[in-house]
Image (cartoon, rainbow, N blue to C red):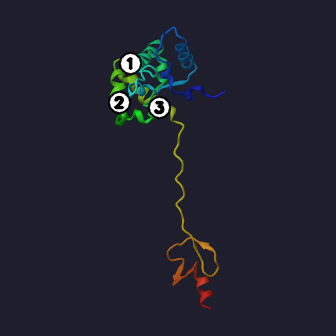
């Protein structure tokens, strides 16, 4: 009974390359037909220092799949999400991967050949914004308060300037305790 339009299935590019008569293609279409969003986020592994393009999808495969899905049903556009999906050291540029700039530097220029500017706006901005619209920032935490202990009554109190007194090693929560100590 949940709202499937708020569900995002990640790593869906592991189902690529797609043959339109393949079972994998029907799985993706079945999920999209039910309103689920699909995230393509494993494509950055195909160009790492290892020869992983046999296991992970390549950029051309992701671009072709997104173009094919949108061509087949334009409504699918509102259910596609892209991510760098960086989770291993070998994806950093320092270790031979594409790094955090992979989406803007490598995938988007090729995707612009398949999708229009307004379609790119939907995939990159509107869909993620819709998916994250439920989030509201938490209230700010209360300011930490330092409490002092009264030398006479031993109660803890908040030190407000002008309302407590200190002399030598003694601390008084108010005039009453100060008077009591003087007696």
Q: Nearer the viewer, residue 29 or 125?
A: 29
Q: Residue at x 52, y 72 (%)?
A: 160
Q: Position of residue 34 (x, y in %)?
A: 58, 20
Residue 67 falls left or right of residue 26 = left
Q: Position of residue 163 (x, y in %)?
A: 54, 77
Q: Residues within 10 Å of mark 3 (few under 14, many from 20)?
A: some
Residue 25, above or below 36: above
The CA distance from mark 1 to mark 3 is: 23 Å
Q: Residues within 10 Å of mark 2 (few under 14, many from 20)?
A: few
Q: Earlier in the sequence, mark 2 or mark 3?
A: 2
Q: Position of residue 143 (x, y in %)?
A: 52, 60
Q: Residue at x 45, y 22 (%)?
A: 56
Q: Position of residue 125 (x, y in %)?
A: 42, 30
Residue with the most extreme top position: 21
The CA distance from mark 1 to mark 2 is: 15 Å
Q: Which residue is mark 1?
A: 60
């Amino acid at each position: 009974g949940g709202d499937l339009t708020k569900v995002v299935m990640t790593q869906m590019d592991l189902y690529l390359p797609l043959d339109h008569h393949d079972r994998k293609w029907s799985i993706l279409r079945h999920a999209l037909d039910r309103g689920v969003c699909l995230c393509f986020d494993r494509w950055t592994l195909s160009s790492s220092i290892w020869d992983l393009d046999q296991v992970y999808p390549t950029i051309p495969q992701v671009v072709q799949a997104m173009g094919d899905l949108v061509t087949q049903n334009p409504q699918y556009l509102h259910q596609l999400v892209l991510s760098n999906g960086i989770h291993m050291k070998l994806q950093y540029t320092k270790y031979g991967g594409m790094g955090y700039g992979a989406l803007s530097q490598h995938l988007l220029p090729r995707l612009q050949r398949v999708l229009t500017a307004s379609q790119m706006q939907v995939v990159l901005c509107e869909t993620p914004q819709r998916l994250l619209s439920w989030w509201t920032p938490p209230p700010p935490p209360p300011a930490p308060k330092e409490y002092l202990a009264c030398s006479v009554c031993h109660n803890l109190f908040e030190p407000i300037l002008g309302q407590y007194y200190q002399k030598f090693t003694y601390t008084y929560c108010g005039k009453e305790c100060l008077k009591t100590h003087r007696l």
